[in-house]
Image: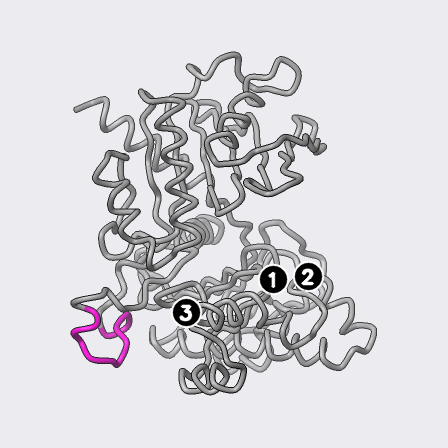
Amino acid sequence: MNILVLNCGSSSIKYKLYDMTANKVLAAGGAERIGIDGAFVKVTMPDGTKKQIMHDMPDHKEGVNFVFSLLTDPEIGAIKSLDEIDAVGHRIVQGGDKFNKSVIVDKSVEDGIEELCDLAPVHNAGHLKGLRAVDTLMPTTPQVCVFDNAFHSTMPDYAYLYAVPYELYEKYHVRRYGFHGTSHRYVSKRVCEILGTDLNNSKIITCHIGNGASVAAVLNGKVLDTSMGLTPLAGVMMGSRSGDIDASAVTYIMDKLGLKPQEMADYLNKQSGLLGISGISSDMRDVADAAEKGDKKAQLAMHMYYYRIKKYIGAYAAAMGGVDTIVFTAGVGENQTFIREKSCEDLEFLGIKIDKEKNDKIHGEEAIISTPDSKVKVVVVPTDEELVIAQDTERLVKELKNK
């Protein structure tokens, strides 16, 4: 079965085409700047090289259409006809409390995603455009939605509720949802396969550390708690997001800067985090380079960054009554050795010991980076959210056909 996985953002479309029978990726790439001048698609060629193709894409329908044309292109394509695509799987950021598992798409699902746009206006609107573009271009092809917050739906109410009047949850669904769930789900399962341990008898802390970052406490295969909240703003410090902040500090800043609610949201989401403290960049690589050269604000940003990850590790070890395994994943978690080391520093009292020499060598590959005598295994596991989406899509489409 050939599964196309689409991740549609507000102005982008990332895609991967899987041959699930042969267990391989046939094609991958991403469209950028949809609806903006200078739109292009970057395609990963079979030999690993990348090719950039300029193409005007005024909307997602044209973006998806152009992706389809590249997939069937005689020179760089992977298939001869769109009929070879058996199903399309979509990443959806916000499923709210309407969707706690992956689902086959129908009108009620699309309507549900649209109703949740208030909770994730940028993300869900983009996803919906992708869904509807495929509706138009491939109307008979089954589609599946895999929700970013679904894995976190096992959180108990005492963990996901905010201490505000309960009617806000009843009327407006104000609660913590958590995100990066597909990644946390993949790496928590994969690390048990690597270590030969039982997921259903485990205490795992998964650290998805990229430009967006979140930490989750996975107890016996189910999420007990996670750092993001109603939106992806909460939790640890991120590339351009503040992470946790006193709500009164928010209103204070709004008053001092004369900002309206949406302007304040943009301020915390797009001008804060590493970027806001360092004044250099939201990219950890740029900030790390500046810190190494002696830039004081870059050094401060780095310290704040790993200190907050360490606090969540400690908090989630307490929440679960201990920890067996810590996983680092995503761009920073997989590649920034210094962040991994410092996030685990001084946690020996929890049984955590990093093998510094081994840690320094690991970039983007599966590896145990703790010492042999460490009671807690610390492991790097590259994430593969697209594969999880493809697997869920294959399973649900097969179930649909067997009904």
Q: Residue at x 68, y 68 (%)?
A: 338
Q: Is residue 15 left or right of residue 401?
A: right
Residue in the foreground of this view, choosing between 10 and 186 = 10
Q: Are marks 2 and 1 in contact (CB under 8 Å)?
A: yes
- Residue type at mark 1? Ile
Q: On the image, numbered disc 1 is attached to which residue? A: 369
Secondary structure, mark 1, is: loop
Q: Is residue 338 magenta?
A: no
User: Are the residues tagged 3 and 2 within 8 Å (C-beta)?
Assistant: no
Q: Is residue 51 left or right of residue 326?
A: right
Q: CA distance from mark 1 to mark 3?
A: 24 Å
Q: For the point 34% across and 37% down, which residue is it?
A: 392
**Picture quadrant of residue 294:** bottom right
Q: CA distance from mark 2 to mark 1?
A: 6 Å
Q: Earlier in the sequence, mark 1 or mark 3?
A: 3
Residue range of the region highlighted in magenta in the rendering: 158-169
Q: Earlier in the sequence, mark 3 or mark 2?
A: 3
- What colour scheme was applied to this rendering of the protein? one colour
Q: Residues within 10 Å of mark 1 (few under 14, many from 20)?
A: many
Residue at 54% from the left image edge and 62% from the top image edge: 209
Disc 2: CA contacts within 10 A as few (<14), some (14-19) or many (>=20): some
Say left or right for 378 vs 290.
left
- What x and y, as percent, mark residue 221? 32, 57
Q: Amino acid at mark 2?
A: Lys
Q: Is residue 86 above or below residue 206?
A: above
Q: Identify the residue under disc 2.
A: 358
Q: Given the image, on which type of amino acid does mark 3 rest?
A: Ser
Q: The C terminus is located in which quarter?
A: top left
> Where 259 sits versus 262, above or below?
below
